[in-house]
Image (cartoon, rainbow, N blue to C red):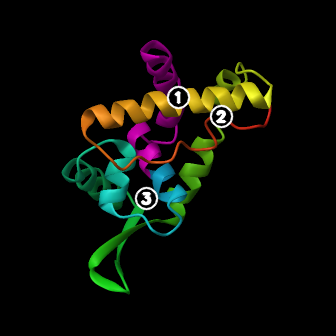
Amino acid sequence: MTQANHMIERVRARELRKQSLTDMEFRALLSVSLMDGNATIGRIARWLGRTPHATSALLSRMEKSGLVTRVSDPDNKSKVKILTTDKGQSLYRQGKESESIQRIMSSLPKSKAKRDQLRSDLETIRDAAFKEFGMASKPPLPRAIISDKEG
């Protein structure tokens, strides 16, 4: 798993560099997108498996680059929501359509049952790691990782 993850990250980093985007910035944009308007520093930190402090620093850099913006929650002024800017959304869409990642993922079984089993196995391993680390709240495994689509 470590070797596969490392090589996928290297492939993604190579592609994202062309857009002046880091893998961690892409993952932050992905998490904000999946949270559909309810992204906060704490939720993003849990999703990324990072501390709120490290996540806040990452988001500050991204805000300076024009990728995200922080807005006060109208229902709770002490809460800050994170939103992607048009630039951030554009770079996220480009990164999501990575051809090399699609080629890598196309090596997965085509059968829905086998993909569902792989998803379940990965979630089991991920959940055990979160539990071992002492984190009760787990982010969802993005559907885009193992979809029913071929390719």
In the structure shown, which secondary structural element does the residue marked by tag 2 occupy?
A: loop
**Circle 2 crowding by C-alpha within 10 Å: few under 14, some 14–19, many from 20:** some
Q: Amino acid at mark 3?
A: Leu
- Mark 3 vs mark 1, CA separation in Å: 30 Å
**149 or 26, nearer to the observer:** 149
Residue 67: mark in rendering: 3
For the residues carrying marks 2 and 3, which lies nearer the camera in this image? 2
Residue 142, image quadrant: top right
Residue lying at 57% horizontally and 42% vertically, measured from the top left: 95
Establish if 23 lies above or below 25: above
Q: Are circles 2 and 3 on residues that touch, CB within 8 Å? A: no
Q: Earlier in the sequence, mark 2 or mark 1?
A: 1
- Mark 2 vs mark 1, CA separation in Å: 10 Å
Is 6 situated left or right of 121 in this image?
Answer: left
Q: Report the residue that reaches farthest toward the top.
A: 3
Can residue 13 be spotted in the picture? Answer: no
Query: Mark 1 sits on what residue?
Result: 122
Establish if 100 lies above or below 70: above
Q: Are circles 2 and 1 on residues that touch, CB within 8 Å? A: yes
Residue 106, image quadrant: top right
Q: Amino acid at mark 2?
A: Ile
Looking at the rendering, the stretch of residues picked out in magenta corresponds to: 1-28
Query: Mark 2 sits on what residue?
Result: 146
Residue 116 spot, x, y in % from top left: 68, 32
In the structure shown, which secondary structural element does the residue marked by tag 3 occupy?
A: loop
Q: Earlier in the sequence, mark 3 or mark 1?
A: 3
